[in-house]
Amino acid sequence: MNRTEKAAVIEQLISKSQDAPIAVVADFKGMQVEEMTRLRVKLRAVGGELVIVKNTLARIAFTNGKHDALKDLFRENCAVAVGREDPVALAKAVTDFARTSKKLALKHGSLEGKLLTAAQIEDLARLPGKQELLARVLGTMNAVPTNFVSLFANMLRGMLYALKAIEEQKKAA
């Protein structure tokens, strides 16, 4: 690889990681091409991308960037999963694949510039996703007016029962 190709790879990695809230570094030693393709497809489905790059080029690309905390941790075989959308979804995808693959091993990651260990990435993967959190918030927001209406309906219903009882009592008398 000549200098211009290396510079192009560095620029490509910088542009991919610049606006990404999460970057996860994993060891992919021994993975077959089919497995790597399945991982790439799974990451693309959640708005992520898998980049395999030489460690020295990755160090240069991550220096003085958003994920600067990762620059000194590139050793051996490294694949970088970069997520541009939901960080939790990317962490789930990588963690689930690592569990089933047995050849992909999480090393570390960076969330908004903060260094994460493999255990912290797994903890992040256990969190509910963005869609689930939005559904919970909307459910909570919907519960307040629903409960309010139910409360007034019950009060009116009780009053109607009392009026109906008084009416029947007057008819009987």
Image (spheres, rainbow, N blue to C red):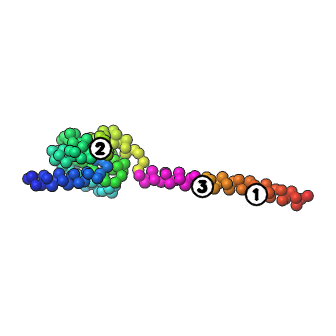
The amino acid sitting under disc 2 is Gly
Query: Which residue is outermost to the right?
Result: 173
Residue ID for mark 2: 113
- C-alpha span from label 1 to label 2: 62 Å
Which residue is at a point 28% across and 51% down the rendered structure image? 82
Q: Earlier in the sequence, mark 2 or mark 3?
A: 2
Which residue is at a point 34% across and 54% down the rendered structure image? 85
Query: Which residue is outermost to the front?
Result: 64
58 and 125: which one is in front? 58
What kind of element bears circle 3?
helix
What kind of element bears circle 1?
helix
So how many labels did they put on this image?
A: 3
Q: Position of residue 20 (x, y in %)?
A: 29, 51
The amino acid sitting under disc 1 is Leu
Q: Quadrant of residue 114?
A: top left
Which residue is at a point 30% across and 56% down the rendered structure image? 44
Q: Quadrant of residue 102?
A: top left
Q: Residues within 10 Å of mark 3 (few under 14, many from 20)?
A: few
Residue ID for mark 3: 146
In the rendered structure, which segment of residues is drawn in magenta?
130-145
Q: Residues within 10 Å of mark 2 (few under 14, many from 20)?
A: some
What kind of element bears circle 2?
loop
Residue ID for mark 1: 160
Residue 111 relative to residue 131: left or right: left
Query: Which residue is outermost to the bottom?
Result: 171
128 and 37: which one is in front? 128
The amino acid sitting under disc 3 is Thr
In reply to whether residue 140 is colored magenta, the answer given is yes
Q: Is residue 78 visible?
A: no
Q: Position of residue 89 (x, y in %)?
A: 36, 51
Q: Is residue 160 visible?
A: yes
